[in-house]
Image (tube, coloured by chain):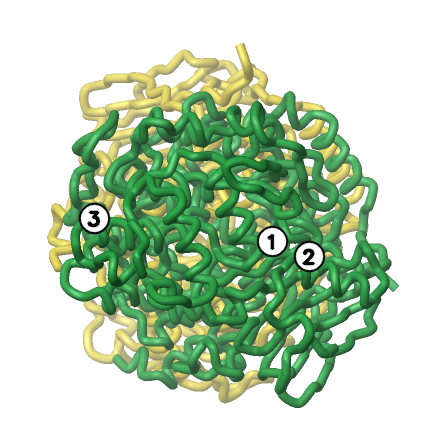
Chain colours: A yellow, B green
Amino acid sequence: MPFGYNGKILRVDLSNKEISVDEPDEHFYRTYGGGSCLGAYYLLKELEPAVDPLSPENLLIFTGSVVTGAPAPGFSRSAIVSKSPLTGAIGESQAGGFFGSELKFAGYDAIVVKGKAEKPVYLSIRDGEVEIKEAAHLWGETTGETQAIIREELADERIVVTVIGQAGENLVRYACVLNNLKSAYGRMGMGAVMGSKNLKAVAVRGHKEVEMKDKDTVLRLAKRFSTNFKAESPDNDGLNDLGTAQYVMGQNEDGQLPTRNFQTGTMEGAENLYGQKMKETILVGRDGCYACPVRCKRVVKAADPFPVDPSYGGPEYETLAMLGSSCGVDDLVAVCKANELCNKYGLDTISTGGSIAFAMECYENGIITKEDTQGVELRFGNAKAMLEMVEKITRREGIGDILAEGVKRAAEKFGAGAEKFAIHVKGQEFPAHMPRAKGQLVLSYALSPLGADHLVSEHDPAFTPGAPSFFSDRVKPLGIQEPLEMRSIDYKKVRRFLYFQNVFSLLDTLTICFFTFAPVRYFTFDELVELVNAITDWQTSLWELLKLGERRIAMFRAFNVREGFTSEDDWLPERMFEPIRTGPREGQKVDKEELKKAIKLYYEMAGWDADGVPTKGKLAELDLFWIADELAKHGKFER
Amino acid sequence: MPFGYNGKILRVDLSNKEISVDEPDEHFYRTYGGGSCLGAYYLLKELEPAVDPLSPENLLIFTGSVVTGAPAPGFSRSAIVSKSPLTGAIGESQAGGFFGSELKFAGYDAIVVKGKAEKPVYLSIRDGEVEIKEAAHLWGETTGETQAIIREELADERIVVTVIGQAGENLVRYACVLNNLKSAYGRMGMGAVMGSKNLKAVAVRGHKEVEMKDKDTVLRLAKRFSTNFKAESPDNDGLNDLGTAQYVMGQNEDGQLPTRNFQTGTMEGAENLYGQKMKETILVGRDGCYACPVRCKRVVKAADPFPVDPSYGGPEYETLAMLGSSCGVDDLVAVCKANELCNKYGLDTISTGGSIAFAMECYENGIITKEDTQGVELRFGNAKAMLEMVEKITRREGIGDILAEGVKRAAEKFGAGAEKFAIHVKGQEFPAHMPRAKGQLVLSYALSPLGADHLVSEHDPAFTPGAPSFFSDRVKPLGIQEPLEMRSIDYKKVRRFLYFQNVFSLLDTLTICFFTFAPVRYFTFDELVELVNAITDWQTSLWELLKLGERRIAMFRAFNVREGFTSEDDWLPERMFEPIRTGPREGQKVDKEELKKAIKLYYEMAGWDADGVPTKGKLAELDLFWIADELAKHGKFER
């Protein structure tokens, strides 16, 4: 029999304990690929609109892709996809580590979970043997304890456990999910969805070899990466040496380090949060993902002023900025402690930091008082207060119960004046990058169906001083022939944004790591196509693959349209139109009229109508005519 | 110095005899490539709207592409691009043979001609030495005589001469241009534009080797083609054996052979026009293009009942159908004679046949009489009358003066009732393919900016019984995963049409032969990309190349919009909505409502507004924002 990609998708209904398997054909896999594109397929097909994301009806999809599990750097990742309790829109979050590849070794591309278990359970998947197991004894436990108990129960020290902590159980709207305690599916509240289903964990172990058409090619390219990544990609070398914490100082020096809830982009004391400082003081190890030599994850250990448990790794750049500088905190150990707590309780460090910084600014402006904070002096720079808030949010205690809802809902609760400090798009808190400094981020944050998301498209060049420029000849196969001004959002920038959005969306669909591929950091486009072909034998092309990326965006958009989102939701918080207050970028702001023009142009480029709805023609072009029918059922395309 | 594609474009102003050279940069060549995409660039930049195509202001562009002249099959072609005197829209025509490659050997990608010589001239280009030479003595001569005299004058028996005959001099609106007497730039009246400029010929000889980054790869793929084309492509083997005349019987048996001005698709006696018959009777040779082993061109010789001169080759399928079956003529030698005359005088055999068949139907229906035809019994099947008309049209004598204007204008002259026999789109007569039998042709004819054109997109499968199916795995890299019903014009067909339109438009832009590439007949998409890279060192991708194809269509459309064309011009002649009268496809017709829906969907897929105007966003996406500015100057995008 000729080689052909034959995947399996596990279906689990927790309400009635039914387990089954989908075996889609090649057309399906070439059309939806994996990741959140595959996830969006199930959500659009099987979820009615307007369902409460925390109700049993919501679907929860754990998914790798057709290439996941191949022994090449960047191919171990997986996504969790669901309707987000934070935004009410399509939700996804990705993580590296070992879950995606392990699920593949067990024989599955994805798990589609629906319903709600009567009592807490966890899923055990061992080489195709799938069990729904009781987890009452795990409810209330930390992620670490849960993982340890499950490994003991299943008598398998190496089983990969994807788990929620107390934050997920307590339905914190930005609760996260972790695998191996260090790889977080951070954003959009996937942990709360798990919690709402009484699903404490998914444990996976497999021994099946991933089938590949041409293993030699995969191994050849993987080996080249492993041998040469330091020489060929200085940025990846930096990731190994300092982790994403390498970016702190560049961001700060360029006035792009979110500080005090995005008031400004520079903080005195930022050097205390820098990767170099971490390396010199508390770094005790580096960790990584299946088949990747970069090992960009940090492992830190400290005793003073806070004990930090190395089992939970160490902070990323995002965490250092959002729980550090954005809260005005420059105490590295405090931020590492906050990181440990977030991973232990299962909280997204970005939204947690964003929510705390928001509350701090409200406090400093008298919108909330010490009474509201149960006595906490919630000021920028107060590291202890920041840590206290992490605890309160997890337990939904006092003000924590409000902050657990995210800044959008919290601002509504806090009332007059709070809204202007709520730095979010579509309900999702900003990650640690400053649109006022980078045109592509303006477009990413305003236009992503996921809300404020920094991994939508490439960042503008000069991401950090000294980092490799993205204006390399390697982007020319995309049809991009010239460098552009960093802050511009003119038609050329919109085009570049759109094209790179398709690239990033493709990588999300294939659940491939951005650090190995995007934007062509290490592997070239040719090599990406070569790898996909070597694994699947599809003889695909960059054309077909980029259409896969474009398809995912259109599906996301269609999902949101069905949920009632409109073009009015494609906008930035007011602070972005106010000048940065200090530092090298003092005075820089986003221009509203330019943004309006850019959004209109983007809709046209993307094939969306003036309301931001994908046209019937665009959906048909993407082989998604069934979604046009679906939108028509909900009143679209009546003209 | 690293290898880089460095092309030159020759500029000739015949009014003031100025000669200069453009040397565009890489960005230009990657954006416009060559062929009619490059031609459209000059037309949009330098030609004002509403200019009479036969006035000195019109531009006339002879152009290969960045890959032309490489020693690989299919890479010798060139295009002539101009505002068409037949349609008033963008005009282009392509030919094989030796002109495109020879121009490259002389150092140029293209020649952009403007103005009008005071007296007849011809251009001589010898290894970069460019001269405007007197041609008063050539005016009134046939193509063959002109070529012979120029070769003698320049003392070069092998110089490639591209030339018009008396039809071009007399401004017949569908006069063609020929190189080496057998390769016709047939359609859209490029010969009339040459005539209007007093430009009788362009003679080119060069000895420069085409620069290639990786000659070995080009030679390797070319050699594989040359060694294996018979084994790997039965269709190309048939092209060698029988020429395009191989298609006559398949078309007839399937009810698709245009007969008596498209009244039906089957003709008794069609076997007399078949390639096999030609081979067994009058075929004396096969001819071809630079570096191609297929040799699909015919050479025929006859004495009785008409003497046929082999210097002018032999008829293609199009000619056999349009001057044969569509005129009701089944006399092979008569059609070969008509072919000889058309090549000798420089007439497009398709529009000539279409105009004569139109007149025949008018005659049979009493719309015109023997008085109007100067005594010719202009009935279907009258071979002598058909030949007589070729002479009259060339000399614009009597009724020939009216038919020389094309069927659209002739119908206006003939008056009431004639319009329904004028089988054209946008003023261009139908080629020999039946939209009522093939959905893709419905879309091609209705939507092409060039008017009725059969080389816009793939034809539906079962082009002829026994020909290789286009539903091969080779189309999957385009994102097309399933076979479709032949006559359908539903959303799936529109999508397939659009995607293949980009492929064909790419081949037109690169002036590559459809018979070697489209749709992936012999070379694969991967090999096409490999060849372009081996020649240019661009490290391009199928994505970038298909965008080049899409860009050409958008530029064509923008040109037409500027000239006042609207969505109303995207339609078919009434006959297409009437049932085919006899044969295996009796009763088949195009559905008007379905066509309206398909056109609306196509506009949306293509990124055009409801009026068929490319949106500002689509133009920006294609790196054509300057055209949006140009259209805005002409009142578009005011909303």
Mark 3 and mark 2 on one chain: yes
Mark 1 → mark 2, Cα distance in angstroms: 9 Å
The residue lying toward the viewer, choosing from B198 and A565, is: B198
**Kind of residue indicated by mark 2:** Gly
Dot placed on the residue nearer the N-terminal end, 3 or 2 = 2
For mark 2, does the 10 Å Cα neighbourhood hold few (<14), some (14 to 19), or many (20 or more) residues?
A: many
Q: Residue at x 36, y 29 (%)?
A: B252
Residue A35 in percent (x, y) is at: 43, 38
Q: Residue at x 74, y 59 (%)?
A: B148
Secondary structure, mark 3, is helix
For mark 1, does the 10 Å Cα neighbourhood hold few (<14), some (14 to 19), or many (20 or more) residues?
A: many
Q: Which residue is mark 1?
A: B511
**Kind of residue indicated by mark 3:** Glu
The image's mark for residue B100 is 2
Residue A158, compared with residue A419, is above or below; it is above
Q: Chain of mark 1?
A: B
Residue A42, compared with residue B162, is above or below; it is above
**Kind of residue indicated by mark 1:** Thr
**Does residue A609 appear in the picture of this structure?**
no
The image's mark for residue B364 is 3
The image's mark for residue B333 is none
Position of residue A134 in the picture relative to residue A313 (left or right) = left
Secondary structure, mark 2, is helix
Marks 1,2: beta carbons within 8 A: yes
